[in-house]
Image (cartoon, helix red, strand yellow):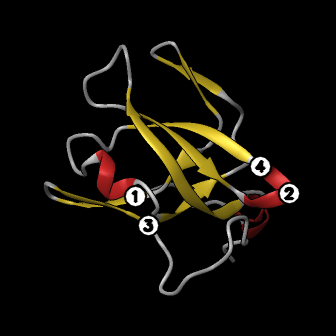
Amino acid sequence: MADPISIQEFQRIDLRVGTVLDVRDHPNASKLYVMDVDLGPELGTRQLVAGMKPYIAADALKGQLVVVVANLEPAILRGQRSEGMLLAAQEGDNVVCLTTASPLAPGSKVL
C-alpha cells in the first residue's frame, strides 16, 4: 500500500482533459512517444513524453481524449522536454490511457 497523503496534498494536483494532437517516436528512446496535447485555451498545447509505445500505436493515440497532470514541473526525458504527465492504468501487460466516459472540452478539470 502506498503512503497516504492528505486531501490538501491531493488537491494540489491539477488533472485536465487533453486531446492528443500529434504523436511521434522519441528520437532517443525505443519505448517513448513525444506527443502534442491540447489542454484548452487556458493552458494551451503541451509537449508530453510518455512510455506508451509498447502498448498502443501512435495512430490510435492521435485524437484521443486523455487525462494529464498539468502542473508538474517540466522535465527533460532522454533529451526531450515533457510538460506534464499522461495518466494510464496497468493490469499485467495491458496498459491503457485514462480517458473520459463522454466527450469533454480540452482543458476541462478532472475532479
Q: Name which of mark 1 and mark 4 comes first in the sequence.
A: 4
Q: Is residue 65 above or below residue 29?
A: below
- For the residues labelled 3 and 1, say whether their Cβ atoms are less than 8 Å apart: yes
Q: Position of residue 83 (x, y in %)?
A: 65, 36
Give the residue drawn at x 79%, y 64%. Answer: 8
Give the residue drawn at x 83%, y 58%. Answer: 41
Q: Cα distance, mark 3 to mark 4?
A: 20 Å
Q: Camera-side residue: 47 or 90?
A: 47
| Quadrant where the image shows the C terminus | bottom right
SS at circle 4: loop
Q: Is residue 76 above or below residue 43?
A: above
Q: Position of residue 14 (x, y in %)?
A: 73, 59
Crowding at dot 2, Cα within 10 Å, few <14 / some 14-19 / many 20+, comes out as: few
Circle 4 sits on which residue?
A: 44
Q: Cα distance, mark 2 to mark 3?
A: 21 Å
Circle 1 sits on which residue?
A: 88
Circle 2 sits on which residue?
A: 42
- For the residues labelled 2 and 3, say whether their Cβ atoms are less than 8 Å apart: no
SS at circle 3: loop
Q: Which mark is residue 75?
A: none
Q: Position of residue 70 (x, y in %)?
A: 69, 50
Q: Amino acid at mark 3?
A: Leu
Crowding at dot 4, Cα within 10 Å, few <14 / some 14-19 / many 20+, comes out as: few
Q: Name which of mark 3 and mark 1 comes first in the sequence.
A: 1
| Left or right of 9 in this view: 36 | left
Circle 3 sits on which residue?
A: 98
